[in-house]
Amino acid sequence: MSAASQSLSLPPPAPGIFARFLASRFVAVVVIVAVIIAVWYVAAVFMNAQVVRDTDRRAGVERTTSEFIAATYQMKRPILPAPHQIAVEVYETVVKVAPDSKKSLIFHAWVTLSSTLAGFAVGTALGIFLAVLIVHVRSLELSLMPWIVSSQTIPILAIAPMVIVVFAAINITGLVPKAFISTFLSFFPVTVGMVKGFRSPEPIHLDLMRTYHASGWQVFWKLRWPAALPYLFVSMKIAIAASLVGAIVAELPTGAVAGLGARLLTGSYYGQTIQIWSALITASIMAGFLVAAVGIVQRLVVRDTGAAAR
Amino acid sequence: MAVNWEGAEAKTDPDTVIEASRLSLTFTTRDGPVEALSEVDLQVKRGEFVSLIGPSGCGKTTMLRVIADLEQPTGGTITVNGMSPAQARQNRDYGYVFQAPALYPWRNIARNVGLPLEIMGLGAVERERRIAANLDLVNLTGFERKYPWQLSGGMQQRVSIARALAVEPDLMLMDEPFGALDEIVRDHLNEQLHDLWATTGKTVVFVTHSIPEAVFLSTRIVVMTPRPGKIHDVIDSPLDKSRTLDIRDTPEFLELAGRVRDGLKAGHAYED
């Protein structure tokens, strides 16, 4: 709910600055984040308690409760790292090492981001292309759609290694096979969304075009395409998040060379939970920025076509 | 699709805009065939304002859609400007105004009016001229940069009339264009439409279910009845070509309205 509608629902006497502040979206977000972090800190104590107790028993150490809690937040390989441990790890691997170093989280994030964007671009184009075909050729909807749907039921974890191996056999490694998997995941929401979008014009809008004796090309560019634009951006938000997942999954079987997926894999090899979590957090922040970037493009394009006014 | 429009050339009368004889259209539905039009004969002359009036299901909208080549008749013949409806449509011989304004929400008012002109491939200068001229005709100069949602329902419908006029057709097909508007706005638009018709000399076929609207606007009123859709009565209006809303209180107007009402009643089966 937007801040405006929330403040509207407040009782008649004009709400003071404080009340409006509490109703703002910023506060809502901060409160939620604070609650999550608080729960996380509590959970970290319980998750890590057993290990700390075992270590203490072996070393014959006795601790007070506060010392015990502090210990659960300071382990090298905790079951669940505390938020500040992840923050420190992210800070050290982002700021304290050169961005082109293999230890840099920026380096790994860029590796993942580049194949995410490549796969997303191809996937969006492919998705739109398939939707155009499906909308214009009736028989293709019947023949193509079941394949498109069933392609998404294949577990991506199973098919990713095969794709990597097949590409490697013809000497293609690095970005292309990863982008391929991102494409595989991202074209689907775009196809489904755009089929719906291209079909969204009402019969009366199509009749209107018919009375003008408009060509199929004109019906597409002057009616179906602009009508589908809002659907395109919703689909692209889903597609870009799916692309990121695809890129990370594709990095798992590559022998963990580079990328956020590689960080996850090496982290789990060596029990580096803090490293895993910092890669995870980086991936989610990246996903957030990517979705927001699509939203910004949406606002620019939609303002340009006037559809924002709807 | 046994549309026989041959022989139309033989009796091409330049004053006949629409010529339908024994026109039938049967829709095939899941519940069996529905006779939307049954053996309809209709002739519309150049410059006439013909209203099709009747209860819902009487085929008045279907009739208009057949003229516009939006539906295909299943029997009989029909010509528009001496051609088949399909040829007339390809010729852009008519402007069609739908029940709803059907404006494209992503286009501003000027670009909505310009839509058919873009499709016709007119140049920017000619488009600008026609957009300005036709928005002026419907009294919407100054709203060019507004978007449809910023306009009232009545204004939106006026934009859609300007859009149909921009094609500069001699024939206007209007399907209950003011049906969704309130009484006051409807009266106002009726007056505007009447002036528009009187000054431009266009031929208008107008679908409505409002008796005062039909009587006020028309030179001829075609009363239709449902199940199957057919013409019950055709009433020529003795009213003056130049009229204002005041004539609605004259005895001639009331008598005409009474005749239309009787026709509607006679053809209406009060099953419920």
Image (cartoon, grey):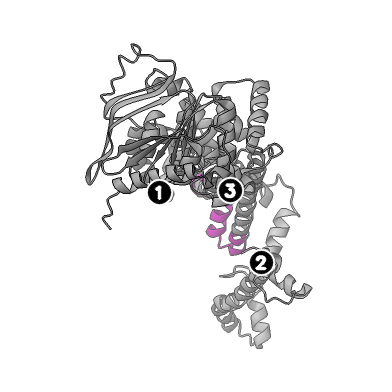
**Does mark 2 fall on the same chain as mark 3?**
no
Mark 1 element type: helix
**Where is residue B235 drawn, in percent x and y?**
39, 36
Q: What residue type is labelled 3?
A: Val
Q: Which of A108 and B248 is in front in this view?
A: B248
Q: Quadrant of the N terminus of chain A?
A: bottom right
The answer to whether residue A104 of the structure is visible from this angle is no
**Where is residue A197 drawn, in percent x and y?**
48, 42
Q: Which amino acid does label 1 sit on?
A: Ala
Mark 2 element type: helix
Query: Is residue A135 inside the magenta stretch?
Result: no
10 Å neighbourhood of mark 3: few (<14), some, or many (≥20)? Answer: some
Residue extending farthest to the right is A17
Residue A44 falls in which quadrant of the image? Answer: bottom right
What residue range appears in magenta? A252-277
Name the residue carrying label 2. A29
Query: Is residue A253 inside the magenta stretch?
Result: yes
Mark 3 element type: helix
Name the residue carrying label 3. B185
